Image (tube, helix red, strand yellow):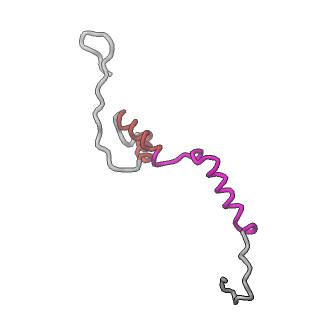
Amino acid sequence: MEPQPRGGALKRKKAVPVEIEACDMLTLLQKIALGQVDASAGQIRAAIAAVQYTHTKKGDGGKKDEDAEKAKKAGAGKFAPAAPPRLAAAGGKKV
């Protein structure tokens, strides 16, 4: 912010977009947070909006997805479904 010549309220400078190398939005936000990259406010807002479509949060899966994953884990190992019985009369071939 810079003062006006005759006093009054402070005047904001317009942010100029900065040339940034192409990278993942989450990586870009991490670099901005660490001070490695200087970006305009518009670029930061765009990166925040885009990150939610490329990286899912842990809680975004939903209950049905969690239940399906738990069922897959429970159905493995000791509790895996057994193989069907062989057909001795047909020599092991389907009838």
Quadrant of the image occupied by residue 51: top left
**In the rendering, at what x and y percent does residue 67 appear?**
67, 53
Report whether 64 appears left or right of 55.
right
Q: Which residue shows up at 49% across the image and 48% down it? A: 55
**In the rendering, at what x and y percent does residue 36 appear?**
38, 43
Q: Which residue shows up at 38% across the image and 38% down it? A: 46
Q: For the view shown, which residue lies furthest in the left direction?
A: 5
Report the label total: 0
Residue 42 higher or lower than 8, as above or below: below
Secondary structure mostly seen in magenta is: helix
Front-lying residue, 80 or 55: 80
Front-lying residue, 40 or 35: 40
Q: Quadrant of the N terminus?
A: top left
Report whether 52 appears left or right of 21.
right
**In the rendering, at what x and y percent does residue 95 appear?**
67, 83
Quadrant of the image occupied by residue 4: top left
Residue 71 higher or lower than 43, as above or below: below
Quadrant of the image occupied by residue 82: bottom right
Residue 39 higher or lower than 54, as above or below: above
Instruction: Please give the range of residues in magenta.
Output: 53-80
Q: For the view shown, which residue lies furthest in the front direction?
A: 95
Examine the structure image and report whether residue 77 is included in the region drawn in magenta: yes
**In the rendering, at what x and y percent does residue 49 appear?**
43, 39
Front-lying residue, 35 or 47: 47
